[in-house]
Image (cartoon, rainbow, N blue to C red):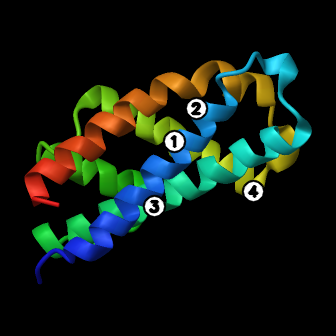
Amino acid sequence: MSIDKEFVRKLVADVLESIRVVEEYYSKPFDELSQAEKIGVRYHIIVLVEALTALAYHIARRLYGLEPTTPIQTFRFLADRGLVNSDELRDIEALIRLRNLLVHRYWVIDDRRIYENVKNDFRSVKRFVERLKNVLGV
């Protein structure tokens, strides 16, 4: 099967838009964020990880014929094939784990820790997405 470039473009747009929104909110000092903005960040992290995961599954299945069973396994497969470097893999895995906490254990979330840690992860995600766009020609 071949890569669905339109599907990839849509997912890339979702990833980049979620990053843009979070970075916009996080351009303010943490203490100036409203509760709605903190909740918005949580939502956009979930969207970001869902889109990244769908993108990774699509590539693993369509480009390599793989059938990974978890998001982290999917990114490790892509790392084994040179599409994700070790720093990106570490940061993406951290985002996947954060998404799981946001969805399944939301009551233990510390918004300040998200604020302090998430920006570095986005640099890795942006590099990964740019590489995919170049490799896939989208």
Q: In this figure, which residue is indicated by the disc labeled 4?
A: 104
For the residue carrying disc 3, how many other residues have a C-alpha within 10 Å: few (<14), some (14-19), or many (20+)? Answer: many
Alpha carbon distance from label 2 to label 4:
24 Å
Say if mark 2 contacts mark 4, CB within 8 Å.
no
The residue shown at (20%, 50%) is: 132
First reached walking from the N terminus: tag 3 or tag 4: 3
Identity, as a three-letter code, of the amino acid under mark 2: Glu
Question: Which label sits in the foreground, 2 or 4?
Answer: 2
Q: In this figure, which residue is indicated by the disc labeled 1?
A: 19
**Residue 56, relative to residue 44: is it above or below?**
below
Alpha carbon distance from label 2 to label 1:
6 Å
For residue 51, the mark is 3
First reached walking from the N terminus: tag 2 or tag 4: 2
Q: Secondary structure at mark 1?
A: helix
In this view of the protein, which residue sits in the foreground, 78 or 138? 138
Identity, as a three-letter code, of the amino acid under mark 3: Ala
Residue 118 coordinates in the image, percent (x, y): 57, 28
For residue 102, the mark is none
Identity, as a three-letter code, of the amino acid under mark 4: His
Q: In this figure, which residue is indicated by the disc labeled 2?
A: 23
Relative to residue 49, is residue 137 drawn left or right?
left
Q: Secondary structure at mark 2?
A: helix
